[in-house]
Amino acid sequence: MRGLLLVDGNGLGWWCCTRRGQGGPPETAVLFGMTKMLIDAQRQLGDYDVVVVFDGGHSALRTELFPGYKQNRSATAGRTQTLTSIVHCQEALRSIRANFLSVPGVEADDLISIIAARSRESGRRTIIWSDDRDLHQCLGGLVVQFMHQKRVTVTKEQALAEWGGDTERFIAWKALAGDSSDGIPGLAGIGEKRAHELVALCDGKLGNLLSERVKRVLEDKSWSKVLHEADVSTYLMTQYALVRTVTDVVELGGKADAVAVAIDKAMAIDPNIVGEEAWIEFVRAYDGFQLIGSESDFEQLYRIRIRR
């Protein structure tokens, strides 16, 4: 079975935009920068298929649970330009019918997580290319994560060492501590350090925090009362759903069918066929083709075949 390289398109796109030199316009920085990096990666990996996964906007599932989800991200000029460049990249790939994955209202993390879960079950070698620590919860089996900025590949045990290699403990910790980058507040009075203590105390199971045993252990701590207010149980379950990545399409409710179809299409083995005329049009539209490399590299990476 061929290996699989799952690329966090938004994450890599942000990196390409922030690191681009003065030699090219921002609207093509993502397309050419990402393509060049992925071709180099594929040459090193050899027998790995590549699927680039993009966000389809904010998660409809999480926004319904918590309307403030990711509302803390201000629309600066740089941010708007980068997001426009990423959309531009998708449009370019769509114009030559290249395989990539994006579903409106579904985040890349969830799409990657669903595919990773299938890889763990089938025993397929899979590398998740992303610097996002949220994706640590997708690791296990033959699924590892390549963190580009640090240039390291980590296994589940290495990534989750401070939680004993336990995915559920990691998710429970995030639920308690919150995630400021996504605008998810933690439990009032419980910071990252206390969240670690609580995860150990409840053995990674948030429901145990409300037990009488835990209450007795915490009774001498000034912050124990936070855990025994009437609405904390519902709050913790909501937090858990916000920070946990989806592992099965059925969890996406009304988006399930669209996601299943999109994943099947992106994972298809047969390459698309692009006529020479369409290919020339593409090269002209995105000036700087020399940055990509050879035609055969591009064909191999994006699973297209140029018909002469």
Image (spheres, rainbow, N blue to C red):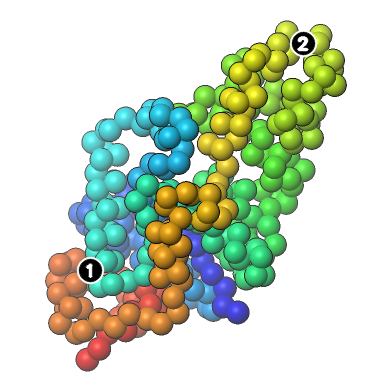
Secondary structure under the numbered disc 1 in the rendered image: helix
Residue 116's image quarter? bottom right
Q: Where residue 304 sits in the image (x, y, percent)?
A: 33, 79
* Residue 287, disc: none
Q: Amino acid at mark 1?
A: Ser
Image marks 1 and 2: residues in contact by CB distance under 8 Å: no
Q: Where residue 252 sits in the image (x, y, percent)?
A: 48, 49
Rate crowding at label 1 as few (under 14), some (14 to 19) or many (20 or more) other CA atoms within 10 Å. some
Name of the residue lying farthest toward the front = 254
**Residue receiving disc 1:** 95
State the residue at coordinates (20%, 78%): 279
The answer to whether residue 130 is above or below residue 297 is above
**Of the image marks 1 and 2, the number of the one nearer the N terminus:** 1
State the residue at coordinates (53%, 49%): 251
* Residue 221, disc: 2
Residue 220's image quarter? top right
Q: Where residue 245 sits in the image (x, y, percent)?
A: 55, 46
Q: Nearer the viewer, residue 233 or 247?
A: 233
Q: Amino acid at mark 2?
A: Lys
Q: Where residue 255 sits in the image (x, y, percent)?
A: 42, 52
